[in-house]
Image (tube, coloured by chain):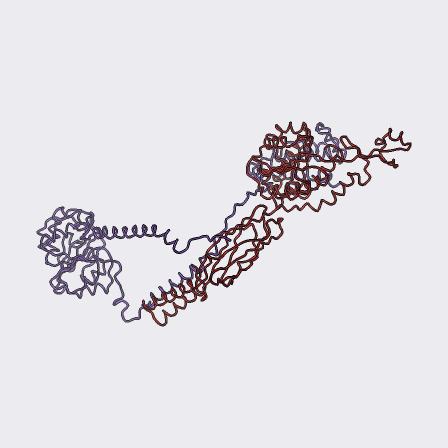
Chain colours: A purple, B red
Amino acid sequence: MSTPLGRSAGESWRVLRTPLLVTGLIVLAAIVILIATSARTSGPFSPDSTDSDGARALAALLKNHGVSVHSTETLDDAVQPGEGKALIIGPAGSLGRHDLERIAQARWSHLVLIRPGSRALEVLAPGVLQTGDVLPSRSREAGCDLPAAVRAGTVTVSGPTYSAPAAAVACYGDGINNTVIRLEVGDRIVDVVGTPTSFTNAQLADDGNAALALNLIGTHRDLTWYLPQFESTDTGTDSAGSAPLIPPDVRYIGWALAFAVLVVAIWRGRRLGPVVAERLPVIVHAAETTEGRARLYRRSRARDRAAAALRESALGQLRKAHGIPQRAEPSAVVATVAARTGRDPVMLYELLYGMPPLSDAALMSLSFELDVLTQEVRHP
Amino acid sequence: MVLTGRAGVLAAAGVVFVALVMPSWAGVGLVVAVVLVVCVVDLLLAGSPRRLQFSRDGDNAVRLGERAVVQLLVTNPGRRVRGLLRDAWPPSAGVVDPPHKLDLPSGERRRLVTQLVPTRRGDRRASRVTVRSIGPLGFAGRQSSHEVPWTVRALPPFKSRKHLPSRLARLRELDGRTALLVRGQGTEFDSLRDYVPGDDVRSIDWRATARRGNVVLRTWRPERDRQVVIVIDSGRLSAGRVGDAPRLDHAMDAALLLAALATRAGDRVSLLACDSAVRADVRRPAPQDVLPSFVNALANVEAELVQTDFRIVVSQVLERLGQRSLVVLLTGLDPAVIEESLLPVIGPLLRRHVVLLASVADPRLTELESSRSDLVEVYAAASAARTRLDRDRLTATLTRAGVTVIDEDPDHIAPALADTYLSLKKAGRL
């Protein structure tokens, strides 16, 4: 008879419900906090952001002057019909050509492009080109006859510059490289602003920055503040006409496949009982210390010690074989061995009691000679 | 909960279904729902592995290298259980069988056999019995584990048993059952018999000869009921592997042969395995119990990585010995350990008892010393020579102190120890 181990379903639930509840609450709280905080500080040039690179001050200023600011991050709000309204497109994110064309077709009366890329310029502000030069942050005169700029006076500008076509008004630059450009495309006014930092919370109070922003942006009662995100789809004119590369059904198949993988993982992952652990004994080779000492000899080139050990070992065998007493003098040993083996006593003395070998080759030959000498003893 | 391959196949078929028939969220949902419903239904229909009842039967002990059979009785009081049963043991228990297939209708009982071939000495405890009960559809099942305790003790193998008959024959010669003509100090007078040419004249009993008129000889027989204490060092030195087993296992083998022989010779044998603490202790068991009790006591002794404390060894031995006895120390001949730890404390032992030190030599050293074909090997040979010289010096020191030293490689240590015992007995030194 035996008792089953492990918990039944009811016991499992009773044991697990408290941790599950706590985990759930923590996750929920984390999500709530994340949402609550991210709404207020969502990146640079956001009308909700109070960071130094945010634009909450500008949004508040515009509201004080009777402009209703509608902040959005979705493309759908930017492509709605916009007669009599203004659209400001933030510097972050990326928009595809198709999206930009939809914005162009939305008939906005006033477009403000904050630090636009070349694709946006091509579609929304034809004729304006990026020059590649970057202005250092400095207080500058308007240098043009745009009323908004003239009234604002000096403005602290910095950032990428643009070159304007002949019909456009270019300000804050040297005539070729400018940071603020106003041009008319059809019945629409388009402002290209290369200096987003001038209108941020940090710099809006400097010089005439606030005045320029109000004059430039606050011309219409209804302003849509669009911060493009990265998820904008780019399946427009570029690939129009050709079939999409990935069929839309794939994601359903993907989900079904994921479920199948989960099932297979549970099937293969469950073991038939736990792994049995075992305490293993320590086992070392008995000759470990001897081999370790051999390596030490070799590394430190202890030829003298190695030779001494080999000689002593050979002497021991010779003494035993020829019946030489332990305390016999070297000369007596050599004489006896020479007499028995017929070798030259001088050579024998050198071999058995000589100087330590000075090179590896000498050690090798010493070892060989000793081996030959004792071989005769071992196998007479 | 357990899923089977069928559930995997069903889910895979669901992928095909979604791709070809319903490429939509509804299709995905349908597949998930079908798989879940099938699995849950199967799970509910599966017999409960928790309600199974177990009991065990079978071998409790096995000699290392042989096969033990342990039976598991499974009773099912509930619904039919089909699936797999795994009787889990530690790796060194050497379970031979794969997991059992189980098909146990309600109210029936099955006997499942697990065969073990342990690979190491010592107690092997059964771990859990895990039952996986698969539902009638074969898609999902339930699994649970039961603790069904059982222990199989793997005993020392006693490989040197093969040397026993020849040594017993020599013992019988000593015993006087064959003509025995030796006499020695301390041997016991046995009987008188007529002189046969060739007998040792020193054994002639002149008084009896004078009384009888023909030449009469005293015969002697070896003394009986002597004490033999076998001490196995289970410390650091015994952990070294010589050949394919630790020194400790070779020492145990030799100890068992000596114990068997000494018991047959009529001596009382005790056993002590000791390092910094006593690991096994058997005191003078009855002759028929000697081998079983020794083997049992030694089964769980493992080499500990501590220095053997010979003070404990000596005091333990002295405590259990009164009369003059033979003390056999099975340890390693390591100059540092023996000179620092054993020699200072062995005096009291040597004064009253005969001390024999047996050490398992490593054939690898001879091998290292004899091969000298390149520089690496020459250094190794020098190192091996140094080790052997140290051992020889130590042996000489011990012999001078009065200890008989046996230093043999694993194959010869057990017979050499037995022979030394016999020659001590023959010389009447016990």
Is A299 positioned to the left or the right of A309 in the image?
left
Please name whichever residue, B184 or A306, is drawn nearer the observer in this view of the structure.
B184
From this viewpoint, is residue A77 visible? Answer: yes
For image coordinates 18% across by 64% down, the residue present is A79
The answer to which image quadrant residue B201 occupies is: top right
Please name whichever residue, A53 or A50, is drawn nearer the observer in this view of the structure.
A50
The answer to which image quadrant residue B346 occupies is: top right
From this viewpoint, is residue A293 visible? Answer: no
x and y, in percent, of residue A120 in the image: 21, 60
Q: Is residue B107 above or below residue A288?
A: below
Is B38 positioned to the left or the right of B404 in the image?
left
Please name whichever residue, B80 or A287, is drawn nearer the observer in this view of the structure.
B80
Q: In this view, does B122 lie above or below A79?
A: above
x and y, in percent, of residue A1 in the image: 51, 53
Q: In this view, does B276 lie above or below A251?
A: above
Quadrant where the N terminus of chain B sits is: bottom left
Give the total number of marks visible in the rendering: 0
